[in-house]
């Protein structure tokens, strides 16, 4: 547990959030066509391991330029690392 110094004393932190469990990860990617309302899906397990793990993470930053979706970062459990990590990759999808 960490404490932060404040001008008038010490601040005690709120309880920690529950851990991000691998069982709660997103394991399917979806593409939605907003014009036709068609939906396509595919399991993330068909992707290379590094991309599969990153796309299951939370709090990725993203931006779309034309037809390319760029994602970077994210935090979650990596089976490869055997721990929770912040992902260091930039992907263009």
Image (cartoon, helix red, strand yellow):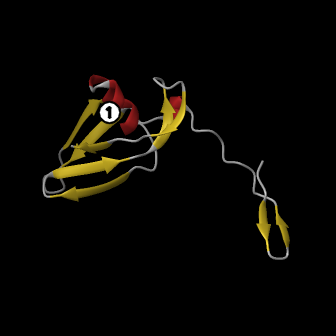
Q: Quadrant of residue 74?
A: top left
Q: Nearer the viewer, residue 71 or 27?
A: 71
Q: Could you tell me which secondary element the residue under label 1 belongs to? A: helix
Q: Nearer the viewer, residue 73 or 59?
A: 73
Q: In the visual, does 4 lie left or right of 21? A: right
Residue at 27% x, 41% y is: 30
80 above or below 57?
A: above
91 above or below 34?
A: above
How far across and down, in percent of the image, does residue 70 sit? 26, 50
How far across and down, in percent of the image, does residue 10 sit? 84, 65
Residue at 36% x, 38% y is: 55
Q: Quadrant of residue 80?
A: top left
Count numbered badges in the picture.
Answer: 1
Q: How packed is label 1: few (under 14 Cα within 10 Å), some, or many (20 or more)?
A: some
Determine the residue located farthest toward the right in the rendered image.
9
Q: Quadrant of the C terminus?
A: top left
Q: In the visual, does 55 lie left or right of 63? A: right
How far across and down, in percent of the image, does residue 34 sit? 19, 56
Residue matched to label 1: 51
Q: In the visual, does 61 lie left or right of 67? A: right
Residue at 76% x, 52% y is: 2
Q: Nearer the viewer, residue 30 or 65?
A: 65
How far across and down, in percent of the image, does residue 82 sit? 54, 24
């Amino acid at each position: 547990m960490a404490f932060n110094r404040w001008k008038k004393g010490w601040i005690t932190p709120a309880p920690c959030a529950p851990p991000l469990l691998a069982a709660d990860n997103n394991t399917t990617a979806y593409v939605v066509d907003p014009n036709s309302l068609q939906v396509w899906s595919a399991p993330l397990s068909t992707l290379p391991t590094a991309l599969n793990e990153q796309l299951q993470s939370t709090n990725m930053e993203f931006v779309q330029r034309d037809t390319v979706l760029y994602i970077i970062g994210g935090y979650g459990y990596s089976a490869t690392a055997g721990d929770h990590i912040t992902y260091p990759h930039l992907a263009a999808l």
